[in-house]
Amino acid sequence: MAEQFDYIVVGAGSAGSTLAGRLSEDANTRVLLLEAGPADRSFWIHLPIGYGKTMWSKRYNWCFHTDPDPNMNGRRIYWPRGKTLGGSSSINGLIYIRGQREDYDHWAELGNEGWGYDDVLPYFVRSEYNQRGASAYHGGSGPLKVSDVGARHELIEAFIEGAGHNGVPRTEDFNGERQEGAGYYQLTTWRGWRCSAAKAYLAPARSRPNLRVLTQAQATSLILEGGRAVGVRYMRHGRLCEARCDGEVLLSAGALLSPQLLQLSGIGPAEHLRSLGIPVAVDLPGVGENLQDHLQMRLIYECTRPITTNDQLRSLFGRTRLGLQWLFARSGPLAVGINQGGCFMRALPEEAATPDIQFHVATLSADMAGGAVHPFSGFTLSVCQLRPESRGRVRIRSTDPFEAPSMQPNYLATDLDRRTAVAAVRAARAIAASPAMRPYVKREFKPGPQTDGDAALLEFCRDNGATIFHPSGTCRMGADPLAVVDARLRVHGVRGLRVIDCSAMPTLVSGNTNAPAIMMAEKAVDMIRADAARA
């Protein structure tokens, strides 16, 4: 017989861990959390710089690839996504960014009542335990630990000064009153360890008798009866199991797998479902559409001085020093990760009222994120467009729940996106050429000075652009025919079913997506409880 719960949460990522932790605070609420991956026991998950290892781990990472993208010269782009407790918050770059006020006000303008910036700010604050303490913009008692980078690095200082030479002021807080500026990121770390959503929300809840967490339990379909979601089928240790709920199924499998599970369950574009022989439960043509992502262009420089993490990692003495620094002081590069500093600025100021590009600055260099470092002193200026117009899609290929869906990002599909990409590379070069940074630049290794002119720079973006790991929007909020969920994250046409993760974003936020996903789950908990009280 199927076990019975009040709520079944599918996916233990940023949103799912938050939901399970918060909902189980009520001792009278029975919560089941299903996670397809294993427990988060790996040391490399909890060591901040360890995502260089988990970036490629098939045990803790779905290791997806997109379909060939014609706009990227037919390349298939590697899309890592977390497959463990904490989901992508267990393998991400740890950067704590919320986005811009205007992002959320735009959500509300699109008809999503209750999602304006003033509505969501309290949930960001509630979730956060900031090293700097509580303030109008920050929390001092939430479960998610947020810390400063700590020691200043002369390369980051030079970058910040170089941004200043290009009209971008220094900032101490990208999540305060204004996002625009250059400075150091705050990270989801605490005393030298990663603070994933699982660490923040699940770890304190695991001893509760009303919360059951099942790892290596991959959901295969929703159980629908009479227009209502009443449970979930899942595969665990080779056995097909069922769990049922009296309340709601909360889908938090992420922007790639939430639409996959809906489509496998007969909720999605009817024509596509019928072509695969899937009975249509609800014709929702927007399921899997509206896919958005931040495309990063990585400019790599050889440094004139042996002060980069490359230098430390290439020698036994350097690696030993790094290890001792972390072991005895919980500090240094191992405690920080890769990207220490950044910048939000306008690449097309005549068209953008707020920052339209973001920099991630790393004091190391490699051919790709998480790859082996180069055999020279190197650093990386990664830059991405914040609000792409291009839209892709996610669609299942078959009725096999274990087959990865078709993922077509459709990067650089619009004129604005192409112009912004080229302008972003030029902005990076302008900062690198500034009086502050010039003494540190021995040469531009990639794309190299021979790559110039708009056409050549756009070709560099097509040949080298990569995800910065923020796929979103595939089950978007709204009330129009292509919307998948309403403003309370309830799936249109199905009772007892919500989608609560980045797939519900109508438009991609201007920055990293971990903190917004957690915020959405915090807000969803209040909506779930309020709706249950009215029922």
Image (cartoon, rainbow, N blue to C red):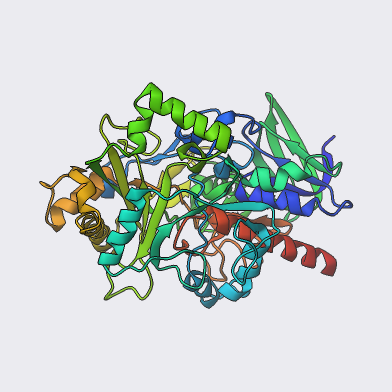
> Which quadrant is the N terminus positioned in?
top right
Query: Which residue corresponds to the image point at 23% horizontal and 47% vertical from the top-left?
Result: 440
Q: Nearer the viewer, residue 175 or 276?
A: 175
What is the x, y in percent for residue 325? 50, 34
What is the tally of numbered marks visible in this picture?
0
Query: Which residue corresponds to the image point at 57% horizontal and 71% vertical from the top-left?
Result: 479
On the picture, is 460 further left or further right than 77? Answer: left
Residue 328 lies, with reference to residue 286, above or below; the image says above
Residue 174 lies, with reference to residue 314, above or below; the image says below
Q: Is residue 350 visible?
A: yes
On the picture, is 248 further left or further right than 535? Answer: left
On the picture, is 5 further left or further right than 407? Answer: right
Image quadrant where residue 431 sits:
bottom left
Q: Nearer the viewer, residue 274 or 161?
A: 161
User: In the image as oriented, which residue stretches furthest toward the top?
Assistant: 316
Image quadrant where residue 82 sits:
top right
Query: Which residue corresponds to the image point at 31% horizontal and 61% vertical from the top-left?
Result: 161
Image quadrant where residue 522 sits:
bottom right
What is the x, y in percent for residue 398? 51, 37
What is the x, y in percent for residue 406? 44, 42
Q: Is residue 73 visible?
A: no
Q: Nearer the viewer, residue 26 or 112?
A: 26
> Which quadrant is the C terminus positioned in?
bottom right
Query: Which residue corresponds to the image point at 59% horizontal and 60% vertical from the top-left?
Result: 132
Q: Nearer the viewer, residue 473 or 375?
A: 375
